[in-house]
Amino acid sequence: MILIDLHIHSRCSDGTLSPASLAELARRRRVSVVALTDHDTTSGQEEFRRACARAEVQSLTGVELSAEAPYTLHILGYRINPHDVPLQTALQEIRVYRDERNETICRRLREAGCAVDLEEVEREAGGEVVARPHMARVLVRKGYVPNLLAAFARYLGRDGVAYVPRRRLSPAHCLRLIRESGGFPVLAHPGQTNLDDDALDDLLRKLTDEGLWGLECLSSHHSSETIFRYLERASRFGLYPTAGSDFHGENRPGVDLGVPVSEDLLPWARLGIRLG
């Protein structure tokens, strides 16, 4: 068995550690392979790659895209070219949409009696992507809520008074961007879709026809029983099973870096990884 983690986030999106700190943490935890998969940005990839090389930890370039659906649908891209022009153009457009949404959320927070402005949220984020976890941390720091969970329940979650839906790319567009940038697209934490078995099978069938490469079976979001069911689905649909913790540092307490897997879990050579 080895430890890998193909789903982690840095301060460049909604994590709390720098890309270099993540590489050092992976070294300390003896993780063999890691992928930085920040939301809608590749700005931390170069720092992460250099830090992993210094730490003697093998790394993959990555990204996490949110796809349009009436449920949570996130698609990871591994071994992408972070300099691919169509990919970067799409990511920039997503960030513009996100900025507009963030301004609206902050306005609604102020209307709800919380003195929060976008500038202080941007300072809290300290990176290219500003997201709701950064707003949640500001709300906690200013005493409007006791913790991050309460911030989402009361203000920022789907039923919160300041919630604003996101504009997203279609699933097919996400898959195409990843594949055309040289990457391998993987459906992240399928349990978060909250689809029943038949609906999930329909989704996997459609995404596989459109180029899906893998399914994140081993995840901090999944129970042992759920992991078994997803491994069976990956086999049935001809998808590679992947493993990731969805590590966010302090923004997701209780989740540690590294997932134990068998050494032959993935075709490492196709991903540019040499184990041992």
Image (cartoon, helix red, strand yellow):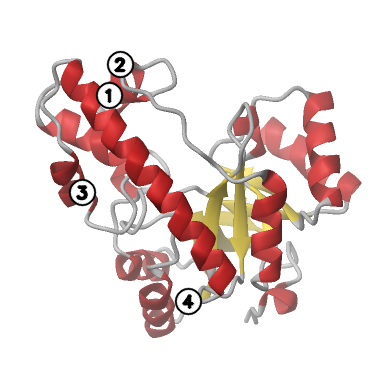
Q: Separation of disc 2 and disc 1 at Cα?
A: 5 Å
Q: State which mark lies toward you, 4 or 2.
A: 2
Tell me the SS state at disc 2. Answer: helix
**Can you identify the residue that label 2 sits on?**
154
**Can you identify the residue that label 4 sits on?**
57
Q: Residue sitting at 88 percent across and 47 percent down?
A: 237
- Amino acid at pointer 1: Ala
**Can you identify the residue that label 3 sits on?**
122
Q: Residues within 10 Å of mark 2 (few under 14, many from 20)?
A: some
Left/right placement of residue 128 relative to residue 199 reads left
- Pinpoint residue 163: horizontal percent, then vertical percent: 37, 23
Q: Is residue 187 above or below residue 53?
A: above
Q: Separation of disc 2 and disc 3 at Cα?
A: 21 Å
Query: Is 112 in front, or is 195?
Result: 112
**Can you identify the residue that label 1 sits on?**
151
Would you say the residues marked 4 and 2 are in contact, meaning their CB atoms lie under 8 Å apart? no
Q: Separation of disc 4 and disc 1 at Cα?
A: 36 Å
Return the disc, 3 or 4, that comes first in the chain's sequence: 4
- Amino acid at pointer 4: Val
Return the disc, 4 or 2, that comes first in the chain's sequence: 4
Would you say the residues marked 2 and 1 are in contact, meaning their CB atoms lie under 8 Å apart? yes
Q: Separation of disc 3 and disc 4 at Cα?
A: 31 Å
